[in-house]
Amino acid sequence: AQKVTQAQTEISVVEKEDVTLDCVYETRDTTYYLFWYKQPPSGELVFLIRRNSFDEQNEISGRYSWNFQKSTSSFNFTITASQVVDSAVYFCALSDNNAGNMLTFGGGTRLMVKP
Amino acid sequence: GAGVSQSPRYKVTKRGQDVALRCDPISGHVSLYWYRQALGQGPEFLTYFNYEAQQDKSGLPNDRFSAERPEGSISTLTIQRTEQRDSAMYRCASSLGGMNGYTFGSGTRLTVV
């Protein structure tokens, strides 16, 4: 069975601080995909990244970076020099071969960036 | 269309009424998914289609919920005899299929009073 755990329910930081959002997953499959989505106050779900289980190389996109560690089943997301516009709920999600293309989401982490 | 379109954006209905939620996926997208997101939680899978075929409906909570995609494009999620616990954001997503990423619509916020 698949499971995604985002242990941090809420995080509050001051603008320009770095912040890391944790994601731990469980799957029995060796082939799987991990995702991060952003849900701003307006409510839509915005795709941020998809990684497959065979690619453990960390990725950086502007102020965003992702650290994929198979040994600890984690896929953490770091925002560098946070901005007020980063305030949102962030969801980590997992899809594996046994689930077709179904996504299992974590409970989300609410990030509040204060000016 | 340019994105996944869902209608209505907001729906308030009385307990016991039936509701139909519509999803218009991105043109050419093979796969279409329905998710439900309760307040303060992550989205939960309901069902999905490849073309017009419903591939998995294991997430539908009970037999009051059904979905169809008769021509492999627009899909309708129907909830019969609505109950207050059905209140949630209902999200539709589409993709090219396989392990491609999804594009989510803006959702329909359903409130059952």
Image: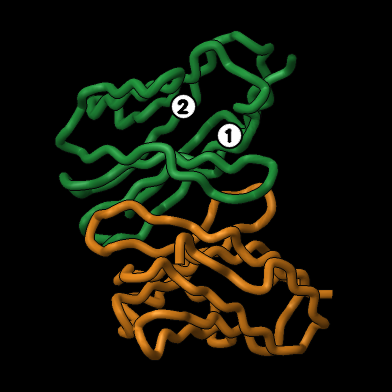
Mark 2, Cα crowd under 10 Å, few <14 / some 14-19 / many 20+, is some
Q: Is residue B37 left or right of residue A22?
A: right
- Residue found at x 57% / y 29%: A8
Q: Does A40 appear above or below B43?
A: above
Q: Position of residue B90 (x, y in %)?
A: 59, 66
Considering only order in the chain, which callout, 2 or 1, is on the residue closer to the N terminus? 2
Discs 1, 2: same chain: yes
Under circle 2, the secondary element is loop
Asked if labels 2 and 1 touch by Cβ distance under 8 angstroms, the answer is: yes
Q: Residue at the location (54% across, 80% down)?
A: B77
Disc ID at residue A109:
1
Q: Nearer the viewer, residue A114 or B80?
A: A114
Q: Residue at x 46, y 49 (%)?
A: A105
Few, some or many C-alpha atoms within 10 Å of disc 1 (few <14, some 14-19, many ≥20)?
Answer: many
Which chain comes out orange in the rendered image? Answer: B
Q: Amino acid at mark 2?
A: Asp
Name which residue lies at 30% across and 31% down: A73
Of helix, strand and loop, which one carries label 1? strand
Q: Which chain is green?
A: A
Q: Which mark is residue A22?
A: 2
Output the chain of dot 1. A
